[in-house]
Image (cartoon, rainbow, N blue to C red):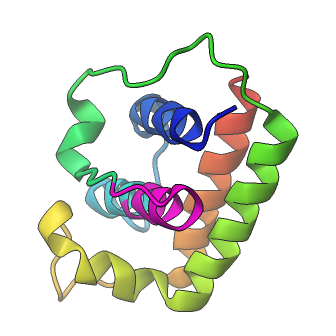
Amino acid sequence: MKCDEVCYSVCDFSKEFIQNYQNVILGQNVVDAIIVDFINYFAATECLMDLGMYTKDLRDGKILSDHKADLEKKVIYKRLSICRDNYDALGIERSIKRNSHMNWVTEQTSIDNEEALDVINAFIVAYLNSF
């Protein structure tokens, strides 16, 4: 299992996830921004990759991963969970707004941290259940 394989697999799954996940409190643009920002953070901190994923990439239909890759669910869960906790500690809203050139979130957008964590937790659980 290579780190880039995990990143590409997570990216591919995110495209499916946003089609089915809704959060009426945050809205779709914010959900998209949270997912993309978290994936970029994961790629940078865990894999030393500049993934450069934008919210528009969630709907481009491109497949990045080799679905035959042997991904270890237990290891991935641990790494995603640690990354989620570190991402939360750094400030989710601040990160999303800092990267607003990659999403449709404006400086005026309010992002509830607990709701954002709920989105990330739902994403991690759904990703792991997709194996």
Q: Residue at x 34, y 60 (%)?
A: 27
Residue 69 image point, x, y percent: 63, 18
Quarter where residue 31 is shown: bottom left
Q: Which residues are magenta?
A: 37-50
Q: Is residue 19 magenta?
A: no
Q: Is 83 left or right of 42, judged from the image as shown?
A: right
Q: Is residue 52 above or below residue 30?
A: above
- The residue furthest top is 68
Label tally? 0
Q: Residue at x 51, y 42 (%)?
A: 7
Quadrant (top left, top right, bottom left, bottom right) of the C terminus: top right
Q: Residue at x 49, y 42 (%)?
A: 21
Q: Is residue 93 above or below residue 83?
A: below
Residue 62 image point, x, y percent: 27, 22
Residue 56 image point, x, y percent: 18, 44
Q: Is 105 left or right of 123, judged from the image as shown?
A: left
Q: Name the chief secondary structure element in magenta.
A: helix
Quadrant (top left, top right, bottom left, bottom right) of the N terminus: top right
